[in-house]
Image: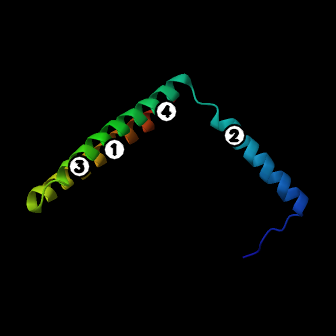
Amino acid sequence: MKAIIMPRSTSGWTALALAAVSLGLAGCDSPREDALEQKADTVEEAYDAQADRLEEQADTMTGAAEDRLENKAEAVEESGEAKADAVEDKADQY
């Protein structure tokens, strides 16, 4: 495999240009996309909070009851992540 070697000054400017373009594109979200991304964050935070409460309850238990509640907490967290991902995917369409 051959490596492409660029003079130092050129590669530095190239990296700088790529960074500038990336930052410019990152700021191109529409208001609707921003709102949907905020909604996704809110959904995920709500499910995480619910999962945290279930885990705290599980910490007060032992045995099978503790395991069931921990499993439920994990399922709630995964569900929240899936719903947030779906909202983010929808946001990406705008």
User: Which residue is pictured at 35% across the width and 45% down the height?
Assistant: 81
Q: Position of residue 46 (x, y in %)?
A: 32, 36
Q: Pointer 3 and pointer 4: residues touching (CB < 8 Å)?
A: no
Outermost residue to the top: 31
Query: Quick one: SS at disc 4?
Result: loop
- Secondary structure under tag 2 reads helix
Tag 1 secondary structure: helix
Q: Which residue is mark 2?
A: 23
Whether pointer 1 and pointer 3 mark residues with C-beta atoms closer than 8 Å, the reply is no
Instruction: Give the side of residue 23 with respect to residue 78, left or right.
Output: right
Marks 1 and 4, how far apart at CA? 17 Å
Q: Mark 4 highlights which residue?
A: 93
Q: Residue 63 at x, y = what percent? A: 10, 63
Nearer the N terminus, badge 1 or badge 2?
2
Q: Residue at x 88, y 62 (%)?
A: 8
Residue 9 placement, left or right of 56: right
What residue type is disc 4 on? Answer: Gln
Of the pair 68 and 81, the residue shown nearer to us = 68
Q: Nearer the viewer, mark 4 or mark 2?
A: 2
Residue under pointer 3 = 56
Residue 4 or 24: which is nearer the viewer? Answer: 24
For residue 36, above or below residue 49: above
- Amino acid beneath label 3: Glu
Instruction: Give the x, y percent position of residue 59.
Output: 20, 55
